[in-house]
Amino acid sequence: MICASCKSVEFEKELTLDEIEDKLKDAEDIEGTFNRLGERGARFVPDSWEMPTLYFAQDGRTLEIMTKDFDIGQIDELLFHLARVLDCKILGDHLEHY
């Protein structure tokens, strides 16, 4: 799913959807709903309106962030935090987060 209001990034290493779900559930400051989407991967909808919806691809390496209504600073902060929660570098557009 690629759209004008999405930012696509990749994980440094492959993560299973089970690993991602478990790590998100264990994170105290990221609450939301993790939904499996079959072959399309999974979607994480945060409880907070201050966080964008995240789409995890089935390949275990690709993440798409719904960037509509969020500025680059908010997205950058989220990626930095998410990389620490998942214990995996996130790479994209000349950026590396960990």
Image (cartoon, rainbow, N blue to C red):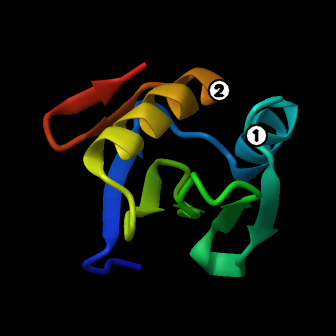
Which residue occupies the foreground of this view, 87 or 7? 7
Is 61 left or right of 55, judged from the image as shown? left
Q: Residue at x 33, y 58 (%)?
A: 8
In the image, residue 4 sits, relative to residue 48, either above or below, namely below
User: How many labels sit on residues?
Assistant: 2
Q: Residue at x 38, y 45 (%)?
A: 75
Which residue occupies the foreground of this view, 74 or 56? 74
Q: Secondary structure at mark 1?
A: helix
Q: Looking at the picture, how far across and down is residue 26, in whole percent?
A: 86, 31
In the image, residue 65 sits, relative to residue 11, either above or below, namely below
In the image, residue 78 sits, relative to residue 97, either above or below, namely below
Residues packed near mark 1 inside 10 Å, few (<14), some (14 to 19) or many (20 plus): many
**Where does label 1 land, which residue?**
24
Q: Residue at x 80, y 46 (%)?
A: 31
Q: Looking at the picture, how far across and down is residue 45, in whole percent?
A: 69, 64
Residue type, numbered disc 1: Leu
Q: Secondary structure at mark 2?
A: helix
Locate residue 37: give its quadrant: bottom right
Which residue occupies the foreground of this view, 5 or 39? 5
Locate residue 56: give its quadrant: bottom right
Q: Looking at the picture, how far across and down is residue 97, in whole percent?
A: 36, 25
Q: Looking at the picture, how far across and down is residue 40, in whole percent?
A: 59, 77
Which label was assigned to residue 58? none
Quadrant housing the C terminus? top left
Asked if marks 1 and 2 touch (Cβ < 8 Å), the reply is yes
Which residue occupies the foreground of this view, 14 or 28? 28
Is 48 left or right of 2, judged from the image as shown? right
**Where does label 2 land, which residue?**
85
Quadrant housing the N terminus? bottom left
In the image, residue 56 sits, relative to residue 25, either above or below, namely below
Residues packed near mark 2 inside 10 Å, few (<14), some (14 to 19) or many (20 plus): some
Residue type, numbered disc 2: Val
